[in-house]
Image (cartoon, helix red, strand yellow):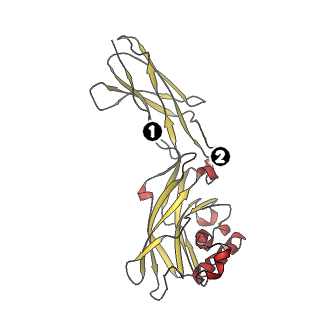
Amino acid sequence: MHIRATVAAVTGALALSALVVPAAQAADAPSGKAAFGSAASGAESGSTTTSTLDVTFSDMKVNSGKNIVVGTTNVVSVPVTYTVTHAADLDTSSDNFATGPLIYHGSSMDTADNVLISDDPATCTAASSTVLNCKGVINIRPADGDLWNSDAGTWGAGALAVTSNGDEKTQGGLGSTKVQRYSKLTVNAGPEPVYKGKTITSTGKLSRANWEDNAYHGYTNQPVKLQFRKAGTSTYTTVKTVYSDQYGNLKATTTATYDGYWRFSFAGTTTTPAVNATGDYVDVR
């Protein structure tokens, strides 16, 4: 679930609106789910609420500690685990209680300009009378406009919970993760074959996902290493560093010495992950 703009639109049960059943079934819905629907409607209207649910969240891990890399079309499902600590007398059955993870772009929940929340409530198991271990999934849909290019970088992590009587709690500052723009890198080395001592020219392109037009565009003015792996070996060594041009294009020349594989290698940035081109074999005669 994607929410852009003010944190008021994020508060509480909006994140759990996946629990709301269709209108035709509302009369038969459990009371807890009906309350979630009511709270979601209030949140969507922009109303703010004060945390009234006595729970705390901790031990949050987003995507198993790995960066979240998002392309232009494929849905990225991000696993999240965390702990909920609650009063012993709180009814945490699904009819009364639901919780879900979220990530947000901004220095805090109060100033977040984008929030991504789990479509469905997390699955929780009781570790004790006051502790729940929860697992949820946040789905990111780039083709649906979930992200802007300016969203790439560090995000905060948080969670929320709501009960059937309308008590709710939202908590940020539970950790951080990076959301990055998927990168691609190509190489073409030649001529093939080439005589020893002659020039080998390697060309390629460094590009990354643009979340605003759902296409890949050149990543400009980035240092990229030209690397070589001699035939029969398994390790690439760096020969030189070149920079991508205004279109993301790359070009590097070297002298032919041995048969082997040429590739470009990009170390990555905060907003864009590292990537290696598939090595291109050149036969030296």
166 relative position to 46: left or right = left
**Residue 36 higher or lower than 215, as above or below:** below
The single residue placed furthest to the left in the displayed view is 232
User: What quarter of the picture does the C terminus occupy?
Assistant: top left
Q: Which amino acid type is marked by label 1?
A: Val
Residue 14, horizontal then vertical, whole percent: 63, 70
User: What quarter of the picture does the N terminus occupy?
Assistant: bottom right
Q: Residue at x 51, y 47 (%)?
A: 270
Residue 124, horizontal then vertical, whole percent: 44, 74
The Cα–Cα distance between marks 2 and 1, rounded to whole angstroms, is 22 Å
The quarter of the picture where residue 29 lies is bottom right
Q: Residue at x 41, y 29 (%)?
A: 263
The quarter of the picture where residue 232 lies is top left
Q: Residue at x 59, y 66 (%)?
A: 109
Q: Which residue is mark 1?
A: 275
Secondary structure beneath label 2: loop
Secondary structure beneath label 1: strand
Q: Which amino acid type is marked by label 2?
A: Glu
Residue 212, which numbered label?
A: 2
Q: Residue at x 46, y 27 (%)?
A: 187
Residue 255, horizontal then vertical, whole percent: 39, 15
The quarter of the picture where residue 277 lies is top left
First of labels 2, 1 by sequence position? 2
